[in-house]
Image (spheres, rainbow, N blue to C red):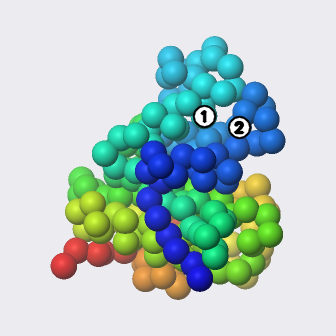
Amino acid sequence: MIEVRPATPERWDDVRTVLSPKSVDTPACWCLAMRISAGDPRIKDQPARARMETLKDICHQDIAPGVLAYVDGEVAGWCAVSPRSSYYRLVKSRVIPAIDDQPVWSVVCFVVRAGFRRQGLAGVLLDGAVDYARSQGATIVEGYPADVGGDRIDVSSAYVGTLALFERHGFRHVSDTRSKGGGKPRVVVRRDIGD
């Protein structure tokens, strides 16, 4: 059985299971690269674990920073989804500019734990992210996947997803970008989810 749930405070240990390196003192993204600036005082010149604490604080806000997938009760993956306006680097981006001024939600990251990969969980996470955005009043969800054509994407770049993945889940290509993922061009995709 597969379930997708928002990353709320009571699921913090599961967020850590998916996103944490072996030691919290090892530098890691903690899915903050798009969310805050490198100069943010919460992480600038702070120990590596400051990123973990920052994401933990974000999990305590009214809108969860993402969703978690569970396979038979065990946490298996993560998908970051939030209003685009909450992603500092997207708001400021010159390579992935806003298409228009509509209030969209953005899917920016997928992480599937080893042992659960190649089972279609990225698609389950994407559907769960859309459902969560809808439950919070979103009417449009965007993603910024790599257009890999028929090629494979390397694991370190797969966090952005692929155009084919998003298209299989009802998204449509709306714009090219000047960004790359795994050496492949990234595009803007959208799915209208309003009633």
Residue at which label 2 appears? 28
Query: Contact (CB < 8 A) between labels 1 and 2?
Result: yes
Q: Is residue 31 above or below residue 151?
A: above
Residue drawn at (67%, 53%), measured in percent from left and top?
A: 18
- Mark 1 or mark 2: name the one nearer the start of the chain: 2
Q: In this view, does 113 lie above or below 28?
A: below
Frontmost residue, 28 versus 143: 28
- Image: 98 above or below 124: above
Left or right: residue 119 versus residue 97 is right
The part of the image, by quadrant, that contains residue 149 is bottom right
Residue 162 location (% of width, % of height): 62, 71
Crowding at mark 2 (Cα within 10 Å: few <14, some 14-19, many 20+): some
Q: Viewer-nearest of labels 1 and 2? A: 1
Q: Say which element carries label 1.
A: helix
Q: Name the secondary structure under disc 2.
A: loop
Which x, y percent locates residue 123?
Answer: 56, 77
Position in image of residue 2 (x %, y %):
57, 78
Q: In which quarter of the image is the C terminus?
A: bottom left
Q: Using the image, tell me which numbered label, if any, was put on residue 77.
A: none
- Residue at coordinates 48% horizontally, 53% vertically from top-left? 7
User: Left or right: where does residue 46 sit relative to residue 59?
Assistant: right
Q: What residue type is labelled 1?
A: Met
Q: In this view, does 26 lie above or below 119?
A: above
Callout 2, which amino acid?
A: Ala
Q: Name the residue under label 1.
A: 52
Residue 91 seen by the camera: no
